[in-house]
């Protein structure tokens, strides 16, 4: 093994002698990979097939000690660092070009305590894996809407999901976290230990350290009444207006998504998806107006297990396709917003792309903006456009269409974005990143200075430390 050229946080490359690299490798219980090693190309792949970055080193951590060693190595040499959990982040922030990727993908244990109704899961776990363990005991917590999503990125960014109407966001159900900070210290963050850090983790992203495990509050979740109704595109404006009114008037047991997509038959359609988290009999009554409106051309709502609900959109988010996203929060869905989406979507360049409204949920709305770092509690929903295609030659057209749609939707935005859907500062801009954290940004910047004054963890929706 020769000397290593690797990117630093200060800009220029540095050269690390082979002996130092070997000592780092020997300190790990997991693997250390360089370009050309078996498994390197597989390890640097993430869910979004458009991401093709090549870290100089990948530390495939087997446990907390490996994470501590990797952070110490990065700190000593001032290396550019990225952290990979589930690897589902659309902009690909988990992988850095020419730096050190701290990879948690092999840290995937889940331990459920049914008596306390809690679960502790390591940082590489996906929601599908988490749900499999908790649902075996009839338990669950709010966890996104795609089973392949990692628990880490979603929770640290807030965590919208199907159960949020009744139980709040993922971050609202976080009880504690084990965090390795930039100085290599392992801390427990909870309401009673390092409470300031615990506040920041719930919506502040990966800015404060590497979370090696998450402890969640669980809830009894049995069969749910869930699924989709589908309407023809010529009725899109009417159907989305109905969706808006329905979403504003539902009880806590319901959460919703509405959107525009292309059917397997090649037709543009409107989809309204729901999940009723309560008795099936009560759910039939609450969802009856939705099922009778139109009527829909297809009604796929039926009783199903929560882990099945979590896969409703898996077919539209297949690993390895090329993805690009734009989104922001909305306090309401105006007729103008609906008109804009429908008009623009009629010219969507890829049949794999879709636009959506994802509701926060009633319980999530009742938490104050200051209680957690996630501050967008007054929003009705996130609107987003997830563009997807397979041919690299189509990158330019799909990205351009998505950006133009986002620009057209800007007047209807509440002014903040969902950080789990955002890229790095060089694309988003510092002002948009700050807006994503809302009124909590200055408090987060002070917290960043306390736990990461040198901004080691910057390959994210970065909060710059106050000086």
Image (cartoon, grey):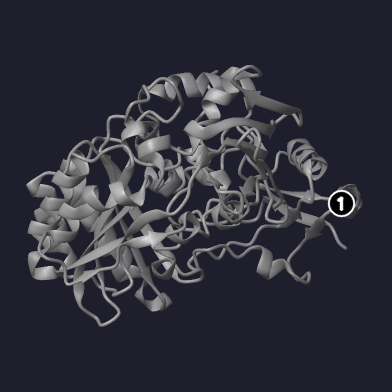
- Judge whether 187 appears above or below 218 on screen: above
Q: Is residue 184 left or right of residue 380?
A: right
Q: Residue at x 59, y 56 (%)?
A: 132
Nearest the camera: 154 or 398? 154
Closest to the observer, 408 or 113: 113
Residue extending farthest bottom: 265
User: Could you tell me which quadrant the N terminus lies in?
Assistant: bottom right
In front of the other: 280 or 8: 280
Task: Give the percent coordinates (x, y) of residue 161.
Answer: 41, 46
Q: Secondary structure at mark 1?
A: loop
Regarding residue 36, the answer to whether it shows in the image is yes
Question: Do we see residue 448 in this rendering?
Answer: no
Residue behind mark 1? 29
Relative horizontal placement of residue 123, taking residue 260 as reference (left or right): right
Quadrant, the C terminus: top right
Residue farthest to the front? 281
Identify the residue shown where x is 29% and y is 70%.
397
Q: State the image coordinates of residue 56 (x, y, percent, origin top left).
A: 71, 57
User: Is 140 left or right of 328, judged from the image as shown?
Assistant: right
Disc 1 residue crowd, few under 14, some 14–19, many 20+, Cα 10 Å = some
Q: Position of residue 319 (x, y in %)?
A: 51, 68
Against 60, is 192 above or below? Answer: above
């Amino acid at each position: 093994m020769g000397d290593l050229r690797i990117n630093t946080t200060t800009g220029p490359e540095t050269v690390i002698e082979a002996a130092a690299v070997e000592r780092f490798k020997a300190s790990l219980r997991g693997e250390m990979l360089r370009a050309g090693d078996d498994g390197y190309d597989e390890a640097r792949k993430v869910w979004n097939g458009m991401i093709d970055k090549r870290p100089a080193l990948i530390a495939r951590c087997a446990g907390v000690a490996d994470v501590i060693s990797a952070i110490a190595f990065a700190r000593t040499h001032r290396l550019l660092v990225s952290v990979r959990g589930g690897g589902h982040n659309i902009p690909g922030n988990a992988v850095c070009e020419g730096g050190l990727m701290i990879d948690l993908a092999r840290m995937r244990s889940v331990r459920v305590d049914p008596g306390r109704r809690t679960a502790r899961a390591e940082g590489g776990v996906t929601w599908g894996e988490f749900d499999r363990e908790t649902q075996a005991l009839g338990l669950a917590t709010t966890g996104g809407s795609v089973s392949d999503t990692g628990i880490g990125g979603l929770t640290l960014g807030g965590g919208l999901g199907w159960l949020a109407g009744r139980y709040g966001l993922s971050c609202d159900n976080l009880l504690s976290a084990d965090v390795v900070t930039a100085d290599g210290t392992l801390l427990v963050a909870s309401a009673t230990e390092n409470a300031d850090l615990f506040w920041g983790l719930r919506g502040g992203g990966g800015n404060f350290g590497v979370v090696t495990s998450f402890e969640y509050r669980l809830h009894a979740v049995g069969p749910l009444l869930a699924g989709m109704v589908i309407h023809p595109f010529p009725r899109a404006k009417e159907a989305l207006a109905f969706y808006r009114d329905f979403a504003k008037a539902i009880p806590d047991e319901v959460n919703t998504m509405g959107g525009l997509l292309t059917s397997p038959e090649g037709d543009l359609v409107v989809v309204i998806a729901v999940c009723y988290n309560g008795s099936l009999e009560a759910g039939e009554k609450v969802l009856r107006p939705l099922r009778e409106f139109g009527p829909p051309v297809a009604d796929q709502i039926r009783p199903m297990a929560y882990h099945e609900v979590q896969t409703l959109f898996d077919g539209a988010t297949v690993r390895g396709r090329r993805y690009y996203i734009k989104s922001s929060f909305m306090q309401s869905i105006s007729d103008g917003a609906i008109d804009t989406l429908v008009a623009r979507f009629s010219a969507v360049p890829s049949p794999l792309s879709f636009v959506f409204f994802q509701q926060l949920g009633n319980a999530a709305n009742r938490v104050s903006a200051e209680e957690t770092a996630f501050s967008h509690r007054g929003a009705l929903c996130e609107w987003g456009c997830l563009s997807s295609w397979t041919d690299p030659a189509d990158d330019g057209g799909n990205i351009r269409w998505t950006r133009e749609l986002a620009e057209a939707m800007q007047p209807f935005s509440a002014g903040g974005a969902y950080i789990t859907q955002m890229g790095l500062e060089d694309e988003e801009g510092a002002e948009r990143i700050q807006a994503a954290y809302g009124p909590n940004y200055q408090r987060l910047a002070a917290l960043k200075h306390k736990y990461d004054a040198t901004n080691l963890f910057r390959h994210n929706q970065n909060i710059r430390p106050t000086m």
